[in-house]
Amino acid sequence: MGTSRYLCVALVISAFVFGCNASTNEVKTYDAVTTVINLIATPEHFFNKKIEVDGVFVGFHQDRLYLSSEHAENLISSLSISVLDDTETEEGSLSFSSCSGEWVKLWATFIPAQQPGISTEQGRLVVDRAMLHKDGKTCWKRTEKSRFIE
């Protein structure tokens, strides 16, 4: 078999394997994978972008993504990012989900603060989905479009 034929077979196998693992309902493209520190230090680089970010999420009226467990335990808000939860019911909210108090990966859109320069918050996360790092399971998923995303 020639080299080009091996390449063709490899491409077909790759397309089959990777194509079958992706759910058409779940496929979204994200602009960046980043950190809480990057969102704090250079928020303007991420405004209105879909991002993936890891941290410790604390709900129950805190609604913040912290850099670490220690920062979350001590509620050090300067090392966290605000999370907007516009879910109508408590039962369906991110704030009251099994994500709260856990190390998570969030898929979200990072939007500018409503009053930049006035508020200490430069930007906020509007979450699409959250996954627990401890077991890789989705702990929350948006079921309706957010009113914060145009």
Image (cartoon, grey):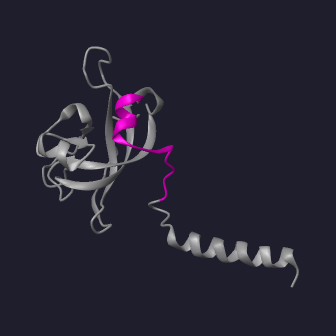
**Can you say whether 15 is above or below 118 in the image?**
below
Q: Is residue 71 visible?
A: yes
Report whether 14 appears left or right of 95.
Answer: right
Figure quadrant of the C terminus:
top left
Picture residue at 50% right of the left edge, 63% below the top? 24
Residue at the top extreme, as displayed:
118
Picture residue at 40% right of the left edge, 36% below the top? 38
In which quarter of the view is residue 136 placed?
bottom left
Figure quadrant of the N terminus:
bottom right
Residue at the front extreme, as displayed:
70
Residue 113 x %, y %: 31, 25
On whether residue 36 falls in the magenta region, the answer is yes
**Can you say whether 41 is above or below 85 in the image?**
above
Residue 117 x %, y %: 31, 14
> Looking at this view, is 84 or 41 the one in front?
41
Picture residue at 12% right of the left edge, 50% below the top? 90
In this rendering, the count of numbered labels is: 0
> Looking at this view, is 150 or 134 the one in front?
134
Report whether 107 appears left or right of 65.
Answer: right
> Looking at this view, is 9 or 146 the one in front?
9
Q: Can residue 149 be seen in this view?
A: no
Residue 118 x %, y %: 26, 14
Picture residue at 54% right of the left edge, 74% below the top? 20
Q: Give the range drawn in magenta.
A: 27-42
On whether residue 136 falls in the magenta region, the answer is no
Residue 130 x %, y %: 31, 55
